[in-house]
Amino acid sequence: MNVTSQIKQPIFDEMELFEKKFRDAMTSQVALLNRITYYIVNRKGKQMRPMFVFLCAKMVADGQVNERTYRGASVIELIHTATLVHDDVVDDSNRRRGFFSINALWKNKIAVLVGDYLLSKGLLLSIDNEDFDLLKIISVAVREMSEGELLQIEKARRLDITEDIYYEIIRKKTATLIAACCALGAKSVIDDEVQVENIRKFGELIGMAFQIKDDLFDYSEEAIGKPTGIDIKEQKMTLPLIHVLNTCTVKEKSWLINSIKNHNKDKKRVKEVIAFVKNNRGLLYAEEKMVSFQQEALHILDNYPKSEFKDALILMVNYVIERKK
């Protein structure tokens, strides 16, 4: 049994029912929309977000979930899918998880409208059921994701970002959504702000570790979904690179910046940049930071009694930093 199946095992029935409810939540009176949403639903990824929702809910409430938990998972998935559809338009990307993106098949105009539709479906699912507390958690996450993306665009042009700004970008861009999933799961079943905040923090720490792991993939030898060096080609600032830029000599720094800005299409030069980052402890440093976020997340789980849900979350935390793609 692979790791994802192991993680899913304690919430297998909930995930099955969730998929049905999620499909229902997407339906519309417009045939074109139904065709597109059918395409989206059948190309889903590992479903980490709903898994976080159900596992956190069950861990804090002795294995209990309710209708709010299902709605929360559906809302987060609807809104997350909307942001992905919009992201592909923004990035002019033709592929998503190995399949054609919505904008590649149906063009940008339709993709933007489909994203808007999914977003409004998510908002209405909460409003119609008066889940205002859950809606607030999700809305804050969407606001922060947009801020994170814009902050990254603003800072990327300058290539001299500090580690603190980098953490702020990844906290908003990546970690905030996982944090929202965890907080939402807890909030759907208990009304204890301290516990909900604890679980939210747990999700945020995993999200930070998750993004640093993604950064490290850019320097890996193996083929993993994205070609090695793509972040350098796209002038994205990753933690290994930031660390090396902040610790190398002035001369080396100007060579690095010049390489990234003006020679990012030159395969040989990109290889040299990767080698330089490796030789100057960039990867080791990023790995240490990733592990420290992971350990902090596990430390939060120490406060909860042993259960199959807690075990699955521990497995999830370890999977995030050990995954191969």
Image (cartoon, grey):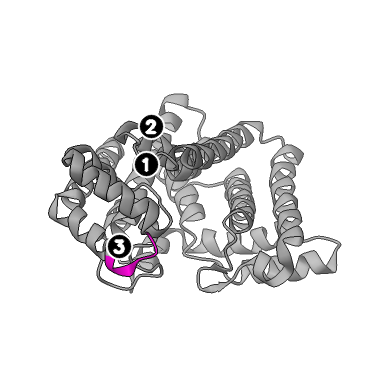
Q: Which amino acid does label 3 sit on?
A: Val
Q: Residue 198 carries which label?
A: 2
Instruction: Classify mark 1: residues with Cα within 10 Å, few (<14), some (14-19) or many (20+).
Output: some
Taking depth in this image into account, of 108 and 210 the one nearest to the observer is 108
Q: Is residue 10 magenta?
A: no
The residue that disc 1 covers is: 159
Comparing labels 2 and 1, the label whose residue is closer to the camera: 1
Secondary structure state at the residue bearing disc 2: helix
Q: In this view, does 146 lie above or below 324?
A: above
Corner quadrant of residue 62: top left
Provide the residue span drawn in magenta. Answer: 264-268
Picture residue at 66% right of the left edge, 59% below the top: 21
The residue that disc 3 covers is: 270
Q: Which amino acid does label 1 sit on?
A: Leu
Taking depth in this image into account, of 149 and 159 the one nearest to the observer is 159
Picture residue at 84% right of the left edge, 69% below the top: 31
Q: Label 1 to label 3, Cα distance in Å? A: 16 Å
Examine the residues drawn in magenta and state their main secondary structure: loop
